[in-house]
Amino acid sequence: MRTQVGIVGAGPAGLLLSHLLALRGIDSIVVEDRSRAYCEARQRAGVLEHGSVRLLREAGLAARLDQEGIEHGGIYLQFAGERHHIDFRDLTGGRTVTVWAQTEVVKDLIAERLRAGGAIEFDVTDTTVEHLETDRPVLGYTSADGTRHEVICDAIAGCDGFHGICREAIPARLRTVTEREYPYAWLGILADVRPSTDELIYSHHERGFALHSLRGPTVSRLYLQVRPDEPIGEWPDERVWDELARRFELPGWELKTGPVLEKGITPMRSFVSAPMRHGRLFLAGDAAHIVPPTGAKGLNLAFADVAVLAPALDALLHGDPGPAGAYSATCLDRVWRCTHFSWWMTTMLHRTPGADAMEARLQLSQLRYVATSRAAATSLAENYTGYPELPAKVSRSARTSPAPGGNFKI
Ligand code: FAD
Ligand code: DHB
């Protein structure tokens, strides 16, 4: 078998890359080791930056997002019994974020790829990537019916998340990993109840951090800081609601409760593996980097990577290796900005077990600074809505010849 780009992983990075490549007339195959139903139901991120929304619109993927996504012009920061609004529109010259769940992004991407005749193989096993240092790398997999496939590609994109195989295919001596684990985790619930707030609430409380997010007019998403080794069995629904109510407590405000639809615990780490390219293998999204979720950056970073990768592969396949050569450094600039912002939000808002009085006072001072200084609030708003600006040009610049070996269609 032959294709132009072999893509490992049908998460947001792999699926969006395959769509962006198709817009440029480049063929790809996406192989995924989970089922379609599993990929579409996996509860994860929920906030899209301004630039991610623009990218999806320019890529023709925003019909449902524009109908059902919920635009937010700010967030609340809560601490010391006060709730402060950080007004993104005012601080950034009109920028906003949009609450649109990763599950919906993935559903739309899968539907669009299949509608357009794109190749996605779900339920594969034994994925391999080989001959990466040649210009004919090979993607191997066993399809659900037990048949072994070897696909000869021009390039391979490792979009297979943190636990995938692609990062490990880069020789260890050529990789630098920079990593930090945090001494806490998030217990997240999805609840069948109208959100109790008009904007997301990030609450710093002496009992630990809490976040109130939402998924729609009648569905709320909430998170609680817990210990990383906390058994989920110790958190029956009533205990979760009681703890949330305490951490969001404010005179005159009430947390609405309802049936819990889903519950899970997510560990928190910062992780960057560099470089993001080895020969003809390009890593994108969680395969190369992880941020703690407090800045809502994970999904947006995955989009940012593939927004750079699609034109870089287009150029490479047309004989210009320049943008592909710059891919890793270009992405890592943004990755490190988001790594810093996510670390900053995380350490400002969470309670570190065993922290001394100095740390607690410094956190409160920082929170008050952000809540009262326009300069400090602008920095938060600029980073939260997306910095630097995402390149969102999705179409190919005028070229006369198709990429060699490709089915060129416009
Ligand atoms: P993924 O979404 O992980 O997709 C990778 C895909 O590759 C998966 O479908 C996987 O099954 C597949 N795969 C793996 N190995 C193989 C293989 N060998 N062969 C074939 N396929 C393979 N971010 C936020 O901003 N806010 C949040 O609240 C938030 N919550 C999260 C909760 C959890 C439990 C996790 C794990 C992540 C969360 N994130 C959150 C991060 C965000 O969801 C990710 O950054 C985003 O999913 C990255 O997309 P991706 O496509 O790079 O990776
Ligand atoms: C959500 C997740 C985040 O990590 C965050 O910072 C804000 C919102 C969410 O799942 O809605």
Image (cartoon, grey):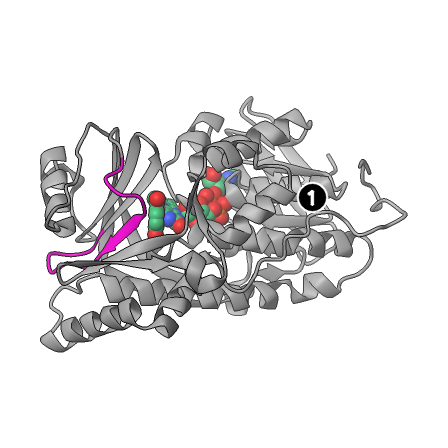
Q: Is residue 321 above or below residue 45?
A: below
Residue 391 % position (x, y): 63, 57
* One can see residue 272 in this view: no
The verdict on residue 204 being magenta is yes
Q: Quadrant of the C terminus?
A: top right
The residues colored magenta run 195-210
Q: Which residue lies most toward the top here?
A: 145
Label 1: state its secondary structure: helix
Instruction: Specify the farthest residue to the right.
Output: 400
Q: For residue 209: magenta?
A: yes
Q: Quadrant of the N terminus?
A: top right
Residue 208 spot, x, y in % from top left: 15, 56
The number of numbered badges drawn on the structure is 1
Q: Amino acid at mark 1?
A: Leu
Give the farthest residue toward the bottom: 358
Residue placed at 17% from the left, 62% from the top?
351
Q: Position of residue 121 (x, y in %)?
A: 58, 30
Number of other residues with Cα within 10 Å of mark 1, as a class: few under 14, some 14 to 19, many 20 or more? many
Left or right: 20 as drawn, with respect to 265: right
Predominant secondary structure in magenta?
loop
| Residue topped by disc 1 | 21
Image region (quadrant) for ligand 1: top left
| Residue at image point 75% right, 44% down | 24
Rendering quarter of residue 198: top left
